[in-house]
């Protein structure tokens, strides 16, 4: 069974990809911006804060209701669909963390 997307999962992924180019702080200079890809629908969502402004890290707050499974009492998303993958957009193309890390490693 696939794991749902949560803040804790993002923290674990950031730790796993640290020093590889698969995290925002390490690939921003290569033109990558944090985003989420819904593998079920094909939709890609840039990472936004609750007000809709882009943020330089993976944030659950600005994602649409269609991908949110659970919110806390203040309305903040806490659980998202398992089909969401955290990755990056560059020039309109979605990259997984692995793909972004490969690009950073090869200078691509």
Image (cartoon, rainbow, N blue to C red):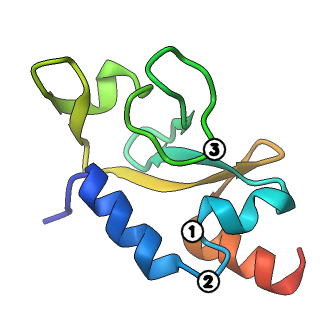
Q: Is residue 13 left or right of residue 107?
A: left
Circle 3 is placed at which residue position?
A: 56
Q: Is residue 74 left or right of residue 35?
A: left
Look at the picture and state if 66 lies above or below 38: above
Circle 1 is placed at which residue position?
A: 97
* The disc label shown at residue 19, or none: 2
What's the residue at 50%, 41% (across, down)? 42
Look at the picture and state if 13 lies above or below 90: below
At mark 2, the secondary structure is: loop
What's the residue at 60%, 36% (across, down)? 55
Circle 1: is it few (<14), some (14-19), or many (20+) Cα within 10 Å?
Answer: many
Q: Position of residue 94 (x, y in %)?
A: 65, 52
Q: Is the C-beta separation of discs 2 and 1 under 8 Å?
A: no
The number of callouts visible is 3
Circle 2: is it few (<14), some (14-19), or many (20+) Cα within 10 Å?
Answer: few
First in sequence, mark 1 or 3: give its number.
3
The label nearer to you, 2 versus 1, is 2
What's the residue at 25%, 50% (across, down)? 6
Q: Quadrant of the N terminus?
A: bottom left
At mark 3, the secondary structure is: loop
């Amino acid at each position: 069974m696939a794991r749902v997307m949560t803040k804790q999962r993002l923290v674990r992924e950031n730790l796993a990809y640290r020093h590889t180019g698969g995290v925002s702080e390490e690939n921003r200079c290569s033109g990558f911006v944090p985003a989420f890809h819904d593998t079920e629908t094909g939709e890609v969502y840039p990472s936004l804060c609750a007000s809709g402004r882009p943020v330089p890290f993976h944030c659950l707050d600005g994602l649409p209701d269609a991908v949110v499974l659970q919110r806390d009492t203040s309305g903040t998303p806490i659980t998202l669909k398992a089909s969401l993958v955290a990755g990056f957009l560059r020039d309109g193309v979605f990259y997984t963390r692995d793909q972004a890390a490969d690009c950073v490693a090869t200078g691509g």
